Every structure is written in structure tokens, then in C-alpha cells.
Image: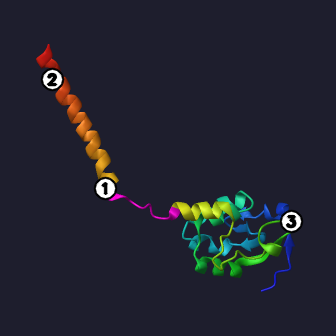
Amino acid sequence: MQVSQKYSPSEISLHTTKKDCWLIIHGKVYDVTTFLEDHPGGEDVLLQASANGDATQSFEEVGHSSTAISMMEGYSIGVVEGYKGGAAGGGAPNTKGAVVGGPVRARTLQQRQPQTSSGFLDLLLPVLVLGLAFGAWYYLTFYSKAKA
């Protein structure tokens, strides 16, 4: 689908209500009014993103599925005039496995990786703290009284 309609940021900013909601993601303009009630994160998320202007960073931080990204094309109504961003010509996000959004996206993916747990250290630290507490209690209760 070739999008030729261009919208100014000021024109897009007029569409931030439940009855008329547009988003800017990667330089493309999406009319998500009909999708508000169906959005898994709730309509408030989209309305807030719309009110904030460019929703690219918020969109990338969430980490949408490839299905969600492919659905976006159906809501595309044009591009932002004079958009200068990462996606060439205000195109759709890159879904070929490359890291979209640069360091922010990479950091988000890195944070989502399950933490590797070293079971031995996870057990050792609490046991060490308990042993130290018991040692202090024993010393203060029995050893110091015996000297006094």
C-alpha cells in the first residue's frame, strides 16, 4: 500500500480523542480510532500516546508482536510532513530481526531476558546472613556474660 497523504504535526495533534485518535509511529500516521476498544493494553494507552505526539518510542519499548506490526498497515492513513527518522521515508518498522529503534530497543530486549540464576549464590547469601546473626546473638548472650 503506497501512502501519499502528508499531514503536519499540528494537524495530527488535533486528533487525540476517543472519537478521533491518530498516532505517529516511525513517521507514519495511523488512525486507530476504531482499534481503541480492541487494543490489548487498553484505549488509555493509545490516547496518551496520541496526546504525547510521536508514539514511536512508546511503541518500541512495549515490544509488539509481528502480528501487531502487520496489523498496523490497515490503520495507516499517511505520513508526517518533513519526518526525519530512522525508517527511510517514514516506512513501517523493520521486522526482519534487526534491532529497531537502536539502543532503546536493544536495552528493552536485554531487560526482558530472564535473569540467569546461580542457585548456589542465591542460597549462600541468606544462609551467611543468618549464620552471622546467630553468631552475634550467641556472642552477646553467652560469651560476653561469661566474661563479666
Residue 134, percent from left and from top = 20, 35
The answer to whether the residues at label 1 and label 3 have Cβ atoms under 8 Å apart is no
Display coloring: rainbow
Magenta segment range? 112-120
Q: Secondary structure at mark 1?
A: helix
Report the disc number at residue 8: 3
Q: Nearer the viewer, residue 35 or 87?
A: 87
Question: Which quadrant holds residue 31?
Answer: bottom right
Q: Quadrant of the C terminus?
A: top left
Q: Badge 2, how many Cα within 10 Å: few under 14, some, many 20+?
A: few
Q: Earlier in the sequence, mark 2 or mark 3?
A: 3
Residue 103, percent from left and from top = 66, 61
Which residue lies at the image location 70% right of the left edge and 78% below the top edge?
Answer: 75
Report the disc number at residue 120: 1
Which residue lies at the image location 71% right of the left edge and 58% below the top edge?
Answer: 51
Q: Secondary structure at mark 3?
A: loop
Question: Which quadrant holds residue 132?
Answer: top left
Q: Amino acid at mark 3?
A: Ser
**Pointer 2 residue:** 143
Q: Nearer the viewer, mark 2 or mark 3?
A: 2
